[in-house]
Image (cartoon, rainbow, N blue to C red):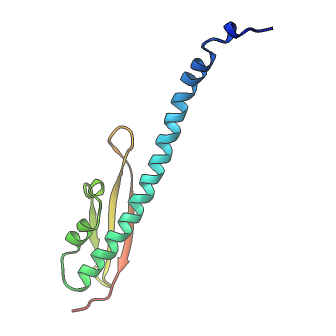
Amino acid sequence: MTTRSDQNGQAAVELVAVLPVLVALLAGVWQVALLGHASWSAGAAARAAARAQAVGRDPRAAARAHLPGEFERGLRVREAERGGRVTVTVRVPSVIGGGRVARVSATSAFAAQR
């Protein structure tokens, strides 16, 4: 039969063993959320850039204006020769380490309104 004094510290040991797993899981969930946010933001920026191009304005400035600050660094705006297509690519920053995890792109098109 075990007594209460035999189990002293057991909860602390279990907590210390589980904490790294919990931190890694939370970082992974946050990274997936950031990836989704980057994808959504790239779509909004692509639509804004395509609208700007359709009326003869600067698509880069429009895309930059519609992106949150963390996605402006590494922004790429590619305009197609025809059809009013604009592709916006943004870097997805890493939650841990400060690098980048991936790039996401979105394409939109509007006919010229000149």
Where 13 falls versus 65 (above or below)? above
Q: Residue at x 33, y 43 (%)?
A: 99
Front residue of 54 and 34: 34
**Going by the picture, which residue comes out furthest to the front?**
4
Q: Is residue 58 left or right of residue 21?
A: left
Q: Residue at x 30, y 84 (%)?
A: 82
Q: Residue at x 33, y 84 (%)?
A: 110
Residue 68 percent location from the top left of the image? 29, 59
Residue 4 percent location from the top left of the image? 70, 10
Q: Residue at x 29, y 53 (%)?
A: 70
Q: Quadrant of residue 6?
A: top right
Residue 91 percent location from the top left of the image? 33, 55
State the quadrant of the C terminus: bottom left
- All told, the count of numbered labels is 0
Q: Quadrant of residue 38?
A: bottom left
Front residue of 68 and 11: 11
Where 4 falls versus 85 (above or below)? above
Where 72 falls versus 98 (above or below)? below
Where 23 falls versus 2 (above or below)? below
Front residue of 111 and 65: 65
Q: Is residue 102 left or right of residue 70?
A: right
